[in-house]
Each structure stands twice: as C-alpha cells, then as structure tokens.
Amino acid sequence: MYNKLIFDYNTPNRVGYDLPTHFAKFDNSKLLAKYGRKQTMILPSASELEVVRHYTNLSLKNFGVETGLYPLGSCTMKYNPKVDEAIASLKGFTNLHPLVSVNECQGSLEVLYELSQKLEKITGMSGFTFEPCAGAHGELTGLMIIKQYHLARKDKKRTKIIIPDSAHGTNPASSNVCGFEVISIASNPDGRINLSSLKSVLNDEVAGIMLTNPNTLGMFEKDILKITKLVHEAGGLCYYDGANLNALLGRVKPTAMGFDVLHLNLHKTFGTPHGGGGPGSGPVGCIAKLVKYLPNPVIIQKGDHYEFSNSKTSIGHVSGYYGNFLVCVKALAFIDSLGETNIAKVSDNAVLNANYIKEALKQDYKLAINEPCKHEVVFGGVINENGVTTLDVAKRLLDYGYHAPTIYFPLIVNEAMMIEPTESESKETLDEFIAVLKLIAKEARENPDLVKGAPHTTIVKRIDEVRAARIPLLTYRELINYHE
Amino acid sequence: MHKYLPQTESDIQNMLKSIGVKDIKALFKDVPESIYLTKEIKIGKPLSEDELFKHFEVLANKNKTNICLLGGGVYDHYVPSVIPALVARQEFLTSYTPYQPEISQGTLQYIFEYQSFISELTGLEVSNASLYDGATATAEAMLLACGATRKDKIAISSALNPRLIDVIKTYASKRNIKVIEIELIKGRTSLKAFNKINDGSLAGVIIQTPNYFGLLEDATPFSAAIKENKGLSIVAVNPLSLGLFKSPLEMGIDVAVGDGQSLGIPMGFGGPYIGFMATNKTYMRKLPGRIVGSSLDSEGKRAFVLTLQAREQHIRREKATSNICSNESLMALWVTIYLACLGNKGLVDIGNLNLENAHYAYKKIISLPHFKKVYDADFFNEFVVETDLSLKTIDRVLLKNGYTSGIHVGPHQIMFAITERRSQAEIDHLVELLGGIKHV
Amino acid sequence: MKIIEGLKYTKTHEWIKVNGNEAEVGLTDYAQQHLGAIVFVDLPPVGDSFKKGEEFSAVESTKAASDVYLPVSGEIIAVNEALEDEPGLINSDCYANYIAKIKINNPKELDDLLDAKQYALIANK
C-alpha cells in the first residue's frame, strides 16, 4: 500500500516547477542583509509526475460522494454537479482581482445580484451578504447584526442569546465569539423547544434566539409560530440556522416562520462541494429593517448595470472581500439548473428518502422519535445491542462500502446515529443501504465481535485517538524527531 | 424529471406505500398549513446543461480580465495546471471533514502535510488545518491573544492591509476589545509610537510584512518589546515572500497568520482563499479550528486523525476558543500541492523573480518625469509611487491598453504589484504608457 | 466507584484533602470514569488565587472537556507537574494524583462541602 509523505521525495536538484526566464538584474544582497532569511526549511524536491502521483495516491485513500452513499446527518452530502465545477472554472471568473473597478466586474456582480435575488425569493428575506465563508461564519455575522440592531436602538441590556441544548455546537460558540451570554434551554425529548422553559427565560435582556428547523433530531418545530411570536413580543430577534434548510427548500420560507436573520450553507442545500471541510459559503440574509446592518457593500442594480452600495450603519467587514465568490457561482448554477419547477422537489424527495429509511429500519434500530421526520432520521443504536455501540455500527458500515452517518449527535439522544440520505439517492441505493444496516443489526445479535472489531477491510484500522492527543505530532519535523 | 432527482413517480408511490402515507405532503403534516407552500417560487425555468453553460459564459465574459497590476493582499500569480487537475478529483472535492479517519486518510494526510509546510515556512512549531482567509485569521489571532492574556486591548500597525483592519475592528467591537493603531514613520510601523502605548495593558501587537505599502518590516523589536509586558506578538506575512525573508520565528513572533492566496490560488474575485495560523507549543491548545495529528492504528500502522478536539465548538460549545467548525480544506490541498511542486529551490526562485520584476518596473517608473518614489526601495513585489498626473487618467489609459491599474493609496499615490507573471514586454509597455500621459 | 472516607467532596466531582491550612484538590473516580482517557490537564499558574467554585483548571479527554472548580477559596501553592507529561495518572489513580495544592483562605467554607457518604448519594445516582 502507498505509504509515503510528500517529504519523502527529497532528491536534491529535482524540481516540479518552472518559471519564465529571469530578465531583470537585481542585486538583492543589501535587502537580504537586512531582511534575509537564515532559517532553513525541510521542503520536498520532487518532479511534477512524482507530485501528481503522490496526491493521486492520497486521493485513493478517501471516500467521496461519487464513491458511494454518504449519509452524514446534518451535512447534506448531496451530488455536486460537474457542470457547476466547469462553470466556476471559467477564466472570466477565476482570473479577476477583487479590487477591479465596477466596470471590469459586471459579470461577477450580476452573479452575486442574481443569487441574492433568488435566495431572497426562496427565504423571504430582503437582502443578503456573501462575505461569510462558512456556516459558522454566517452565524457570527447574523449575531453581529442582531447585536448592532439592539445597540442602534440604545437597547444596551440585551446581552443574552437563547439556544436549545439540542443545537449544533457552533450556535453557542458563535454567540460567545460575538460577546453574548448563552442561555441554554432544555429541549423536550423530541428536541423541540419546551414553550414553558422558553417563556421562563424571556425578558428584556434577551437579544434573540437561535434555532434550526427542522431541529437536530429531524423534527419540525410545530410551535414555530408561537416561538417566534413570543421572542418578538419580548423584544428579541429570531435567528434561523439554515443548516437544515434542505428539508424545507421551496416549501417553507424562513420569514413565514417568523425569522429575522438567517444563514444558508451553500455547500449543503445548494450542492456545492464540501471539499474535505471547505471552502463552504454561509451567506446571511435578513428582513428589511436589518438590511442596513449587513456587511458593506451590497450589490444593487441600476438599469442593466450593477453597482456597490454602502451603508453607514453596517457591522463592517467579516472577511477580506466578497466571501467565497467561486462557491457562489456554483450555487447559482445549481439553482438555475433545477429552476422553479424542481426546487421544491429537492426537499420533498429528501424528506421522502429519510422517512423511507426510518420506516425500514425501525425494527432493528431504536428510533429516537416515532413521527414523520424531515430530511434526516435519528436512531439510538441497535435494538438488543449485545454490547455493540453506535461507533461499532458506523465502523462496520465502512466495511460494506458506505460512509458512516453522523454519530453521537445530537447529544440529547443516547448512542445517536443520524442518517441524512439527501434527495440525490435513488430508491435502489436506499434499499441496498437498508439491507446492509439490517445485516449489521443481525451480525450484532449473532456475532457481535465481528461488528466490534470493525472496520476490517479499510486501509487503516481504528486509530488511537488518545495517543494522538497525548503525544501531539502535528508536523513532519515532529514526526521524524519523535522516538518512543 | 430532473437529472439530479432520481425518484420516478412510481418510486415515489412505492416509497409512500412502504412509509404508510398517501402523499409527500402528509410527511409535512406538522408544518402549519398557513406557511406550507404549494405554489412554485418564481426563480426562473430550469436550464439544461448547455443553456446553463452558455448563460454563465456570457456572465464570465462580462468581466474584463486584463493584465493585473492590482495587489493589496491579492496577487496575480501563476497557477500550475497540476493543482486544479488534482484538486478536482472527487475523492478530495466531494468528501467532508474527515470524521471517519479510516476512509479519509487522503484528506488527513494532506492536511498534515499542509500543517508541516506552514510550520516550515513560518518556523513556528504548530499550524492549524487552516481558516477562511488572511483577514479572519488575523482577527482570530487577536482573539487568541486576548484569550491567552486575559486582556482586552490590542495594538495594530496602521500599515496593515485596510481589509485586515476592517475585519479586526468588526470582530473587536462585538467583544469590547479596544484596537489601537500605531502610527507610521516613512511607511513603516513606528517603534517609538509603539513603546509609548506598550504599558502592560496590551494583549498583543500585530505587524504586517511586507506591509500594505509593500514595504518589508522587521517585527523583531516589536516582539521583544511586547514580550516584556507579557503580550503576544502577531505577524501577518505574505507566505510567498518567506523563501527569501526572515521567518516569523527569526523575528521572535508568537503567532503568524496570513493569506495563502499568493501560493498559487486564483484571484477568483476574492475567494475562496485560505487563512493560515501558526504558533509555538505554548499556545497550541489555544489555536482555533481543526488540527490533524499522526498516530497509530490498532495494528501499529501510521495513521492520521483529527486531534486536540477538546478545544473545539462541538465539545466546548459556548466555552470554545473559537466558533470555527471546519477549515478551508481544499484550499489547503491547493497550497500543499503548490509548495510540493516548488520546494526550497522554487520558493527562492519565484521570490527572486517577483523581487527582480518589481524592482525593474519601480526603477523605470520613478525615472519618468511625472513620477517619483515615496518610500525606500526595501519592498518585495509591490511599491507606491507618487505622481502629479490624474490617477483617473492613468487608470483610463491603462485600461484602454489592457491593464488593470494599481490601487490608489492617496490622492496622488498609486501602488503597483508586479509579480513573476509580468513579462519584460508587459512592464516596458506599462512604462511607455505611463510616460506618455500628459497633464490635461 | 471508589470514594475515600475522610476527604471532602463537591457536587461537581472534585475531592479535597485538608492538611492544616493547606489542601490538595483533585478529580473523583466518578469524574475520571465519565471523561474517559484524559489527554491533557490545564494546570493553573502557581500564585494565582481563585474563589470558591471558580474554575482553576480544565481536563480534556478525546471526546470531552471539563472545567475543574476549586472547592474552597484559596491560592495555588503547587501543581502536580507530573500530569503535564502523564495526564493519564488521573485515570490510573485519581486520589493519589492531585491537580493542585492550595492555601485555604477561609476554612469555614469547608463546612459547605460534602462528606464521603453524602457524595456517594450523588455519584451513585
């Protein structure tokens, strides 16, 4: 099996690059005497083919959406269309400096304007910024807008954000980074907000609430209209964490639920690739009265010309330029390919797929909530587990050629296993996946050690995480200098 | 029917039957009727692939991509073809954060290699798996310094890129962190001005090199001075310059940050780029974001895995050091392949080519009648010149001749970035054009 | 679940062993079992003072992180440096491996703490 690091390629004078011929003479000795580097570096020396082969071999140690079903709950691992990649690679998009004059970037501005228009229609919001580079970054931006709104009204007491304990960990973390105090409220067993615990914490110190709907158990907040009304009555704003929008796309507008600010994850709902953890894109939208707080600039249309518009009350910049622009290009292409006739079928089919899995597996796995779920379904481990944990089931799935679901989240379900099939998967793929999970449940009953020892077929076996944390070896230099 | 939606009408009926409901709407029965949409949202008819591609080609062509003289943190560098080809492999492109290390060794290993590269470039012991961009990385470094020192005041050089300053101030204002800008002398951060405010109340100081005006700065005296008051020294660096110039370690720096765009990432109208952050072991557990470590599997084989996760939001929630959930992984791969191709030799070579080309252009431009120098010539690949000509006229003339003009850094000052991509003919033509402009 | 007679305990699963006006503070068996393999102990600076109930240290496993609270107000006079290299010592014997030694500011605060029997009711719940 291929087992080299790029640093193992170190033949002196072998190169993997070329450059134009130097034409200008410049004596750098005076400059280097003052600013020059003396510290040496350990860098590889490899030919171009050696580099290409190395990273091709590394890619073969990875599992992607095109390898097989990737049912990672809450991450919406849908198909990433090839044409979107081709479009985002057009030189007119890739080869443009972000500080060019407005006349030189009309195409890019039109992309952002169009995307904003379409997202406004989909969500009901009145304006969008594309500066946030990821979902968590969008949360932070949205919270900053909420903070700015209250401060602008001289309502300085509002320092608290309400977050249910079933929420994604980024919600409380973003609130903290934004300088808010987090009020965590206990959810009902179905992850839904407990109205009386909500009421008990509402007062004039509450800046707002952060919610995802459907919640992290895949359940729709039935009381959503009551919840947002209560928060509004107490003077707070309602933030929608768009992580789970794939369940409601084209069917429910977040503004109709009473939300004031939201972020969307273009890399989830709008089919842009996750890239091994990024680049994502987390555009933030808000209702009309909050638009003036969005990061500057927003793009406006004047005739068939696009321009920047700046607001004096903006929260300021949250990233260097206009966010992950090329990701926005892909998201717009995704929306335009589906169009108005298909966009709601995304959520319809995502929800259908999740419920199909739920019904098929509830005899074998402990269903967390026995109600129709939305785009994802949560189980709490194998029925008659026989010592087999959710981790074991997840690892056994790898043996059968599947990515594992999200495990041990949400925290409020023991042995949680969160499956999100997305709309991209066919009935046949789901049937095969269901059959494998049933088989694993049977193995757990009959031969638990087989499951507990999984994975058996992967290139590496279970990894010692305790060792990794107790002896952190984070670079090549540390690795070669470490001896047991 | 749509090619991204595999469920046929008969599939849907069969699946509904197995679920035991009569239609899909029944699965939404917990949604209040008043907010459930049955009508289409008017976002336009679906476009077939060919229509879609043509539509976006038209949009792309509405952008004018010229010979780029703009810099200010983003530069027109050569992108080796091997990078987009390798990065487009679906195993890299479509996977997610490597939660299942057994089937994610590809991602985990390239992040480990990325961390190693960043550590070598900066000289600092540890790097995280990357952040969004240079500006947010600098703001995160400020939060790290405030957290580590339990102080809420930060000093920043006025010669930081204004985009960095903007983001720093946005983050700082929400946390009631006080940001103090240090005055400049001749385009560089004034040590004297810094010494006046370095009174023990500072969480840290942030210096940039090359700074916004393209000038190299030696942060050594700043790091020494802040250390005496138990604050952290932070430097924002252009990583491409580190083959030639002092590493952050050599300048005694605690935290190095920057944008990886100059390492072969296309300008892409602002992103995606990548922010990097490196530090020494003392602050390892204060780093935001993901970190990959080398460990062993149950059979004793080397294997990579996400580690030191107890710092992160999914465990610490509101007590996490940062809200960063993921990283800019694919861009980390981009930078990693770039540095793998270049190696030591390439990094020095491309550094020198930038230096030579920029100084070649600089000398020619400041010898033109209407242009003169502003600062000394200790710059890397970007420099400011002063002119009594109208900047608007300069921009217009250049644009007409296929150049995107430089950044206006003052009413009579313009800054040009000249990278390894600028040929002698392009530079000579630029000089000729500038020399031909007359007063209106 | 090991609980030692003669020590004082907190509801947040710290133990304190009093010796005159000084005391050792550590994590209980319940805490170490729930955390799993401990991979890092964040030791406080010697000389720092903390109030009763204030977090003075933090411990990390691969899956969790937990703050450690000071049972009574005091000044840190020593830390168990062995935990820097071997945080797992807390897993192997949590009562033999204190995290910090403190000088007690107000001995009266000791009266509010739980004894072994009272703590057992919480830990065995």
Image (cartoon, rainbow, N blue to C red):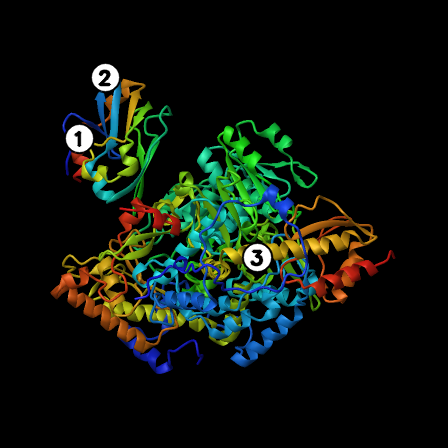
Label 1's element? helix
Q: Nearer the viewer, mark 1 or mark 2?
A: 2
* x and y percentages locating residue B432 in the rendered image: 79, 62
Q: The disc numbered 1 marks a residue on which chain?
A: C
User: Does the CB distance between marks 1 and 2 fall below 8 Å?
Assistant: no
- Amino acid bearing label 1: Gln
Left or right, A452 with respect to A197, comes to left
* x and y percentages locating residue A1 in the rendered image: 30, 66
Label 2's element? loop
Please tell me in which quadrant of the rendered image residue C111 appears.
top left
Q: Callout 2: few (<14), some (14-19), or many (20+) C-alpha neighbours within 10 Å?
A: few
User: Does the CB distance between marks 3 and 1 fall below 8 Å?
Assistant: no
- Amino acid bearing label 3: Asp
Residue B231: mark: none
Above or below A349: residue A214: above
Q: Nearer the viewer, residue B1 or A191?
A: B1
**Residue that numbered label 1 is attached to:** C118
Q: Is residue A284 visible?
A: no
**Residue that numbered label 3 is attached to:** B349
* x and y percentages locating residue A253 in the rendered image: 48, 63
Sequence-first disc among 1 and 2: 2
Instruction: Give the residue at x 59% y 47%.
Output: B164
**Residue that numbered label 2 is attached to:** C20
Residue reaching furthest right? B440
Label 3's element? helix
